[in-house]
Image (cartoon, helix red, strand yellow):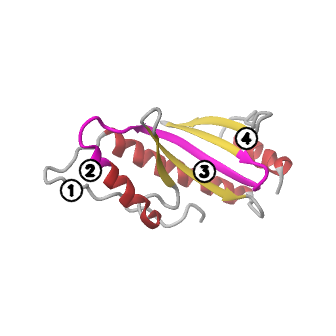
């Protein structure tokens, strides 16, 4: 697809959501806030991929084993993340949700669907991370059930 076409998608998305000047910067990065989600967009020119990511919160001080178990369970075949991946920034303790997708052949409708689905999944996980309570038996609580894949 290329950067020029991606810039058009980002601009068109911005117009549809009321941010007419939405654009990636010179370093192929952009950020917008959708509800409680700080949505980061980063273009990988070499792979012609767009990376969406957001910070979900921080790992809890207590019950980390149960917390990490719940995250790993959700990541298994992406059953609790809709195709995105949850990871941990070891330096900050921040928990992040990330999704990368190939841009080749991506229409505005596809792009909007991916962004909307990513934000919905992120909102679910922001709440789960914020409200995490380990089970008394040391078992991880079940992860949320997500629709498979971010693309419609």
Residue in front for this viewpoint, 7 or 2: 2
Question: Which is nearer the eye, 27 or 122?
Answer: 27
Q: Residues within 10 Å of mark 2 (few under 14, many from 20)?
A: many
**Which is nearer the N-term, disc 1 or disc 2?**
2
| Residue 105 in which image quadrant | bottom right
**First of labels 1, 3 by sequence position:** 3
Instruction: Judge the density around disc 1: few (<14), some (14-19), many (≥20) Cα neighbours within 10 Å.
Output: few
The residue closer to the viewer here, 149 or 12, is 149
Q: Are marks 2 and 3 in contact (CB under 8 Å)?
A: no
Circle nearer the viewer, 2 or 3: 2
Q: Residue placed farthest to the left in the image?
A: 136
Distance, label 1 to label 3, CA atoms, is: 32 Å
Q: Nearer the viewer, mark 4 or mark 3?
A: 3
Residue at image point 74% right, 58% down: 103
Residue that carries the numbered disc 3 in the rendered image: 115
Q: Residue at x 43, y 59 (%)?
A: 75
Residue 38: name its quadrant: top right
Task: Examine the image and state in which quarter residue 20 appears.
Answer: top right
Mark 2 or 3, nearer chain start: 2
Residue carrying label 2: 66
The reply to whether dot 4 and dot 3 touch (C-beta < 8 Å) is: no
Provide the secondary structure element on which disc 1 rests: loop
- Image coordinates for residue 22, horizontal then vertical, percent: 73, 36
Q: CA separation, marks 4 and 3?
A: 14 Å
Which of the numbered marks, if any, corresponds to residue 5?
A: none
Residue highlighted by disc 1: 139
Q: Earlier in the sequence, mark 4 or mark 3?
A: 4
Q: Which residue position holds label 4?
A: 15
Tag 1 and tag 2, C-beta contact below 8 Å: yes
- Where residue 56 sits in the image (x, y, percent)? 44, 40
The image shows residue 43 at horizontal and vertical percentages of 73, 46
């Amino acid at each position: 697809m290329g950067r020029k076409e991606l810039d058009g998608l980002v601009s068109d998305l911005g117009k549809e959501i009321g941010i007419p000047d939405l654009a990636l910067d010179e370093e192929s990065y952009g950020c917008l806030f959708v509800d409680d989600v700080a949505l980061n967009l980063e273009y990988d020119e070499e792979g012609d991929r767009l990376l969406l990511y957001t910070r979900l919160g921080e790992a809890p001080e207590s019950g980390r084993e149960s917390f990490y178990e719940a995250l790993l369970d959700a990541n298994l075949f992406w059953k609790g993340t809709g195709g995105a991946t949850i990871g941990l920034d070891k330096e900050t303790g921040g928990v992040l949700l990330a999704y990368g997708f190939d841009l080749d052949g991506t229409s505005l409708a596809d792009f909007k669907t991916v962004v909307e689905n990513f934000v919905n999944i992120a909102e679910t996980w922001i709440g789960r991370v914020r409200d995490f309570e380990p089970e008394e038996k040391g078992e991880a609580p079940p992860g949320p059930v997500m629709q498979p894949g971010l693309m419609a």
